[in-house]
Amino acid sequence: MYPKLIQELIEDFTHFPGIGPRQAARFVFYLLKEDKMRVQNLAEKIKRLHEEIGFCKQCFASVTLGEGKLQMLCRSCADAKRDSRVIMVVEKEADLQNIEKTHSFNGMYHVLNGVISPLDSSGPAKLHIKELLMRVKNLLAEKKQVEMILATNPTTEGDTTALYLERTFSPLKIKITRLGRGLTTGSELEYSDPETIKNAFINRR
Ligand SMILES: [Zn+2]
């Protein structure tokens, strides 16, 4: 049995996505071996995370909070050169970053903050779908032609989510496309190379 603090830290790390007890233990012992200053630095940054980082009030990408800690717009949403009528809907911010790297998309994003999973009962209410609906309705109220590109991953959950979004938004009569089949089933945007994502974007339908 490990000392209590080590045990607790291992438990904490197992809550990280995709991390099991064995990897969690490796993290803790890595920290224990690492230079004390570096570990304290890391702890300090983790402490600052929630104080200094917030989410874009429009697309929910992360932003550095300014003075007064007001919620603000991210760089893409604040960029007047980007096309606000085209909204790429992604599961998580890592996907957004990867699409940005291709330099082939000039619209806006919307981060859902997860997927609808039929198995673990995490329903649509947890995702930023209500906000997306408001966003699209606001654009329509301004008589704009809206295109929504569903860029959820080609996984069971990603497909379920895309289907749900299609059903939710089809009464609004907007153009809804899905990232093309450049992405093979099961492959995730987060791990796809820029060229593949670019092709998937060009081949959206
Ligand atoms: Zn934004």
Image (cartoon, rainbow, N blue to C red):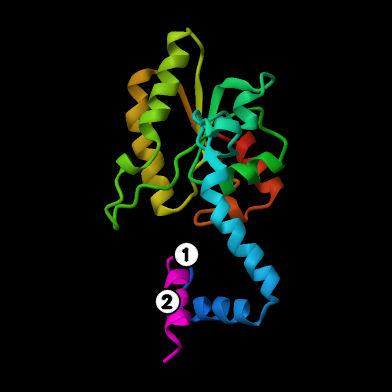
* Residue farthest left in this picture: 121
Marks 1, 2: nearer the viewer: 2
> Could you say where residue 82 lies in the image, as x and y percent from the top left?
66, 23
Residue with the mark numbered 2: 8
Above or below for 184 versus 108: below
Magenta portion: prevailing SS class: helix
- CA gap, disc 1 and disc 2: 14 Å
Q: Indicate yes or no: mark 2 CB to ligand 1 under 8 Å.
A: no
Tell me the residue at 42%/66% (across/down).
15
Residue 83 in percent (x, y) is at: 62, 21
Query: Percent from the top left, x then y, of residue 129?
Result: 38, 34
Circle 1 is placed at which residue position? 16
Residue drawn at x 49%, y 81% is: 22
Instruction: Report the side of 116 relative to 61 (left or right).
Output: left
Q: Quadrant of residue 199?
A: top right
Q: Nearer the viewer, residue 132 or 150?
A: 132
**Quadrant containing the N terminus in the rendered view:** bottom left
SS for callout 2: helix
Residue 3 part of the magenta-drawn span: yes
Helix, strand or loop status at disc 1? loop
**In the figure, 158 relative to 56: above or below?**
below
Residue 171: assigned label: none
Task: Bin the neighbour count of mark 1 within 10 Å (Cα to Cα): few under 14, some 14-19, many 20 and up.
Answer: few
80 on left or right of 55? right
Q: Nearer the viewer, residue 88 or 97?
A: 97
Which callout, 1 or 2, points at the residue further toward the start of the chain? 2
Q: Amino acid at mark 2?
A: Glu
Query: Residue 139 placed where, x, y %?
Result: 47, 15
User: Magenta span covers which residues?
Assistant: 1-16
Q: Looking at the rendering, which quadrant does residue 14 occupy? A: bottom left
Amino acid on which the number 1 mark rests in the picture: Phe
